[in-house]
Image (spheres, rainbow, N blue to C red):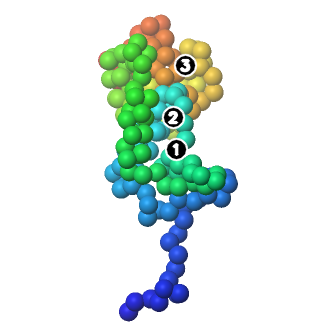
Amino acid sequence: MAVPAAEARPIPQMFVSETDSFVSPSKLPGDALQRTYLNLYDKAKRRGSDPGRNILLKGMAAEGGRVRSATKAEVHRSIGVLTRAAVPAAGGAASPQLEAIAACESGGDPTAIGGGGLYRGKYQFTYETWQSVGGGGDPAAAPEAEQDRRAAALLARDGAGQWPVCGA
């Protein structure tokens, strides 16, 4: 039985900004496109880039200070930009040896936490080791590019023995 229009529930809205602007979930691009965009957005942030406004979650600015949903074409265009931001600049990337160590230690996840919280970040640093190569704070909260630099310094200083299983 059809529900009369007067009794129909409105489509839920997704909160997207502090100015009470909303984006309708029905207007968002497909799931796979959303996942790709969000993964690249997060990776660009981890690399230390400023990916700018998250157009998928915060929408696009429109006339009169309003916000509208990003179109599929705009998300595709942003994916191209985010792909370039997520890839480290030449010379700034981790060496193939460090990439292999990171893949083994954490699956390449710079936010990984293992060993009951003892090992942290892409290279599973202890706080003590992280500090010994000039790191401050939590290694798992540091940008990926910084983790790469600190791991390269550790590798140069002490060799791959710092990663007894994955560095062998």
Tell me which corner region of the image, top left, top right, bottom left or bottom right, holds residue 13.
Answer: bottom right
Sequence order check, earlier mark of 1 and 3: 1
| Relative to 86, 125 lies left or right | right
The C terminus lies in quadrant: top left
Q: Residue 127, image x and y in percent?
A: 58, 25
For mark 2, what is the residue?
A: 51
The answer to the question of whether label 3 and label 2 lie on touching residues, with beta carbons closer than 8 A, is: no
In the picture, the disc for residue 73 is: none
- Of the pair 77 and 158, the residue shown nearer to us: 77
Q: Residue reaching furthest right?
A: 19
Q: Residue 11, image x and y in percent?
A: 50, 72
For mark 1, what is the residue?
A: 54
Q: Residue 132, image x and y in percent?
A: 58, 14
Sequence order check, earlier mark of 3 and 2: 2
| Relative to 44, 66 lies left or right | right
The N terminus lies in quadrant: bottom left
Tell me which corner region of the image, top left, top right, bottom left or bottom right, holds residue 139.
Answer: top right
Residue occupying image coordinates x 51% and y 34%: 51
The secondary element bearing badge 3 is classed as: helix
Residue occupying image coordinates x 44% and y 25%: 123
The secondary element bearing badge 1 is classed as: loop
Type of the residue with mark 1: Asn
Q: Is residue 82 above or below residue 71?
A: above
The secondary element bearing badge 2 is classed as: loop
Q: Is residue 145 above or below residue 115?
A: above
For mark 3, what is the residue?
A: 129
Type of the residue with mark 2: Pro
Residue occupying image coordinates x 51% and y 39%: 116
The answer to the question of whether label 1 and label 2 lie on touching residues, with beta carbons closer than 8 A, is: yes
Report the Cα–Cα distance between label 1 and label 2.
8 Å
Report the Cα–Cα distance between label 1 and label 3.
34 Å
Type of the residue with mark 3: Thr
